[in-house]
Image (tube, rainbow, N blue to C red):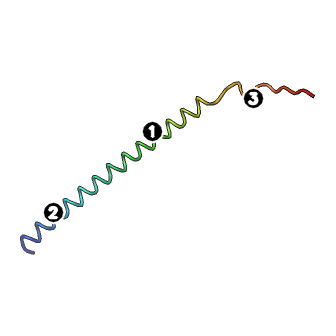
Amino acid sequence: MDTMSIAALSVGMAQAQTAQSVDTAVLKMSMDSSAEGVTDLLDTMGESLDPNLGQNLDILA
């Protein structure tokens, strides 16, 4: 193996590590965004529920 091959291998490995780090960071951002969306959705659903709804039934014949 000559010096140029070792240098090219080193550059390739560094690029692969950088790409993996970027992919991991993007995945983490996506997961955080999804978690926030779910939390917001659950908060909105909880606020929209009326605890008194369905307590009374009026029947007139």
Secondary element under disc 1, as helix, strand or loop, is: helix
- Name the quadrant of the C terminus: top right
Report which residue position mark 3 lands on.
54
Q: How crowded is mark 1: few (under 14 residues within 10 Å), some or many (20 or more)?
A: few
Q: Quadrant of residue 51?
A: top right
Secondary element under disc 2, as helix, strand or loop, is: helix
Residue 27, given in percent of the width and then of the height, sits at: 37, 50
Q: Give, as a three-letter code, the residue at label 1.
A: Glu
How far, Cα to Cα, is label 2 from label 1? 38 Å
Which of the two discs, 3 and 2, sits closer to the camera? 3
Q: Quadrant of residue 12?
A: bottom left
How far, Cα to Cα, is label 3 from label 1? 31 Å
Q: Give, as a three-letter code, the residue at label 2.
A: Val
Report which residue position mark 1 lands on.
36
- Name the quadrant of the N terminus: bottom left
- First-in-chain label (2 vs 1): 2
Q: Residue 34 vs residue 23: left or right?
A: right
